[in-house]
Image (cartoon, coloured by chain):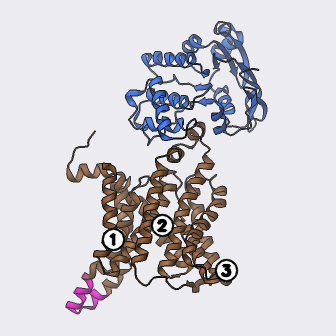
Chain colours: A brown, B blue
Amino acid sequence: MKKNLYPLIFLLALIVLPLLLRQEYYQHLIILFMMWVIIGSAWNLLAGYTGRVSFGHAAFFGSGAYAAGLLTYHYAISPWWGMVTGGLLATAVAFPFGWITFRLRGAYFALATLALNEVLKDAAKIAEPLTNGMVGILIMPTFSSKLPYYYIILFMMVLTILCMRLTVHSKLGYYFISIREDQEAAESMGINTTRYKMISLCIGTFWTGLAGAFYMNYMGFIDPSVVFSLQDLSIAAVLVGIVGGVGTIYGPAVGAFIMIAVQEFFRSGFFGLFKYFADKTGSSAFTTVSEFVKTAHTLGFGLLVIFVILLLPNGIVGDWPKIKRKVFRIKPEN
Amino acid sequence: MSFFRTENLVKYFGGLAAVNNVSFEVREGEIFGLIGPNGSGKTTTFNLISGFHRLNSGRVVFKGQEIHRLPTYQICRLGIGRTFQVVKPLGRMSVLDNVIAAAFARVNTLREARDLALETIDFCGIVPVQNLLAKSLPIAWRKRLEITRAMATRPALLLLDETSAGLNPTELLQAIDLIKKIRDNGTTIIIIEHIMHVIMSISDRIHAINFGQTIGEGTPQEVAQNKAVIEAYLGTDYA
């Protein structure tokens, strides 16, 4: 029970939080955070547990977003129906892709996912009659308030984490980790490695697609460079996983929180500090610096990843015992 | 119906015949030794039986069923377990989790798999290390983990590939005891071993190969007196 205590407290806090925190800006940030927990967890199932690193998760996020957007745009079907379709389409993209590329190992599989990402992005740009190309797709948001979105994504996030926990603590989880550790040993233990890699991929991409469809609903606008973005989605998913801790249930949540925090820290010019100085001193130098800092969040996150890989190779959650020992000087229990 | 047999196994790697026309039959309940000098094709034979390599020609028949076209995981599920000469522990899992993962070949729930794994760990005598990470084990325990993991898939036939290599004399005796215990418990064993006194003392029958070809078969005494075998091991001067 103690194991579930912190997640439950955290969940309660997330349920109550938007009622206390009324500014839409903060609600928006928490919504993005929860969306990233889903993407990070989904990525982590394939990369962290099954050992097949994807550099192209935007391919599945984008497929989900477009599935929801196009249904509304062309057929006026509610984008909420598109949510399920989004998950399913992402899985439908993943299935043949996995079938072909799972014979590749290590970096070659990662490169194939990168290629899928770029292929789908270009396809979305070119197929103008269907996707509107670079103009993108605009739909009317269902709700004007952020609260409904907040609770929908909260619900989805809880489902995702429950799904991950059930998966990891079952035959599937043991099989995924066995495949990660040694594929030949796994085969000799009676594991159909192709089949279980496909299952891992399909579960992960379903949730990623679902997150993509939610994004369409929430933002009301998508274009290929946003939802198939290499640096803002595919690489960010890798970073969220690495910072939080690959192969841990709550690692992606920690990683997502840090990513959103770092991103906003930079975007807001260190919480408006630079703007404050610029206004106070009237110096144009501060205005310029503040403009640069706004776009430097990727740099900040990159530095953080280097720091984490050097000091905490298993991520924050994976190396938590080590952090406790070093920072709080607590002796390990066993 | 024979329990297990190979018929004229042939495997080429490029132009080299790694295994050339090897046939043998294993009776249920025996320990069957497979010997030969380095590079004679013993491990390749295991890889052919367990489906890691495909045969160029020949047949492998287990309990009346042809298995040489099946994938590795199905061969395991049919009841042929194997260990690897170069051990393959699932490093970042505990020893217990290693064995649980293998036990899932026979059961579906975690509770059942855990019970089966604990039982097997006890049987194979690796209880003291069950909570350690597999990658932290010294070689003797790793070899034992290999056997335990294979046993957790409940094999009728177990392929042991040099499980005694690198062990000290005490560990060697324990390994021999374990192998005999596994046989007495009803599992048939094919064993590859370089340490002669081990294989001579535990095998019921021995099949000797060299350069991928059969050079002799029989009881340990017969094989020890076989001219071709002595030649292969000690050179023509001693034959």
Q: State left or right for residue B118 relative to residue B179.
A: left
Which region is colored magenta? A273-287
Provide the chain ID for the residue under circle 2.
Answer: A
Q: Secondary structure at mark 3?
A: loop
Q: Looking at the figure, which quarter contains the N terminus of chain B?
A: top right
Q: Is residue A284 magenta?
A: yes
Q: Is residue A296 visible?
A: no
CA–CA distance between discs 1 and 3? 36 Å
CA–CA distance between discs 1 and 2? 17 Å
Quarter of the rendering containing residue B183: top right
User: What amino acid is labelled 1 in the image?
Assistant: Ala
Task: Using the image, tell me which numbered label, if any, was put on residue B59.
Answer: none
Can you identify the residue that label 3 sits on?
A127
Q: Is residue A271 visible?
A: yes
State the image coordinates of residue A176 (x, y, percent, origin top left).
52, 48
Q: State left or right for residue B133 relative to residue A21.
A: right
Q: Secondary structure at mark 2?
A: helix
Can you identify the residue that label 2 sits on?
A235
Most foreground residue, A2 or A209: A2
Image point (55%, 54%), residue name:
A200
Q: Is residue A330 magenta?
A: no
Image point (43%, 27%), residue name:
B126
Q: Does label 2 or label 3 sit earlier along the sequence?
A: 3
Of the two numbered discs 2 and 3 in the rendering, the one whose residue sits closer to the viewer: 3
Can you identify the residue that label 1 sits on?
A261
Provide the chain ID for the residue under circle 1.
Answer: A
Image point (49%, 60%), residue name:
A43
User: What amino acid is labelled 2 in the image?
Assistant: Ile
